[in-house]
Image (cartoon, rainbow, N blue to C red):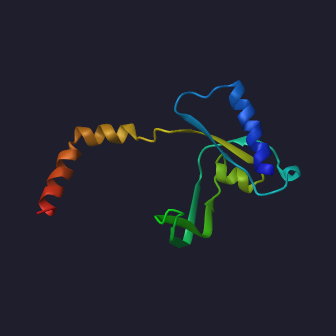
Amino acid sequence: MTAALAAMSVIAYAERTPLPEGTLLNVNVPNVLIRNIKGFKLTRRGTRKYRDKFAVMKDPHGKDCYWIGGRIEDKLEEGTDVAAVAEGYVSVTPIQIDMTNYALLDEMTHKNVAAELDATLRTTGK
C-alpha cells in the first residue's frame, strides 16, 4: 500500500509537469508503513550489489530467466537512492533511457576500435 500511494504522488506530479523526452522517474520505496515514511528525496542512482546467489530458473514459457538474490551489499552514499531508502525516504531519480557513454564512444571511434575488434574476431574465428 505504501508503494502504491508513493507512486500516485509521483504520477500526479508527472501529469502536471511532463518529463523531457527519453526520461523516466525511477521510484524506490522503503518497505514500511506509510506513517513511517520520512518524505521524498530527489536522488542519483546508487550502488547495490547482491552476493552469493544467482539462480537460473524457467519462466512460464519454459525459457531461462535469471534471479539475483543473496546477501545485499549497499553503498550508502549521501544523495543516492540506496541511502535515501535506507534512511526511510522514498527516492525519486530522473533517469535517461540512452545510457551511451558518448565520450568513450568518440574515443573508441577515433581509435578505430571496431576495426581492431573485427580483426580479432576474424583471427580467432578461423
Quadrant holding the C terminus: bottom left
The image shows residue 35, relative to residue 97, as above or below, that is below
Q: Residue at x 68, y 25 (%)?
A: 17
Q: Position of residue 39 (x, y in %)?
A: 80, 44
For this orientation, the residue located farthest to the front is 61
Q: Is residue 114 left or right of residue 56?
A: left
Q: Is residue 14 left or right of residue 116?
A: right
Q: Is residue 61 left or right of residue 16?
A: left
Q: Residue at x 63, y 53 (%)?
A: 77
For this orientation, the residue located farthest to the right is 35
Question: Where, by quadrant of the figure, is residue 73 drawn?
Answer: bottom right
Q: Residue at x 27, y 43 (%)?
A: 108
Q: Residue at x 76, y 49 (%)?
A: 3
The image shows residue 54, relative to residue 76, as above or below, that is below
Q: Position of residue 104 (x, y in %)?
A: 35, 42
Pick the residue in front: 68 or 45.
68
The image shows residue 36, relative to residue 74, as above or below, that is above
Q: Position of residue 6 (x, y in %)?
A: 77, 43
Q: Position of residue 70 (x, y in %)?
A: 60, 71
Pick the residue in front: 60 or 101.
60
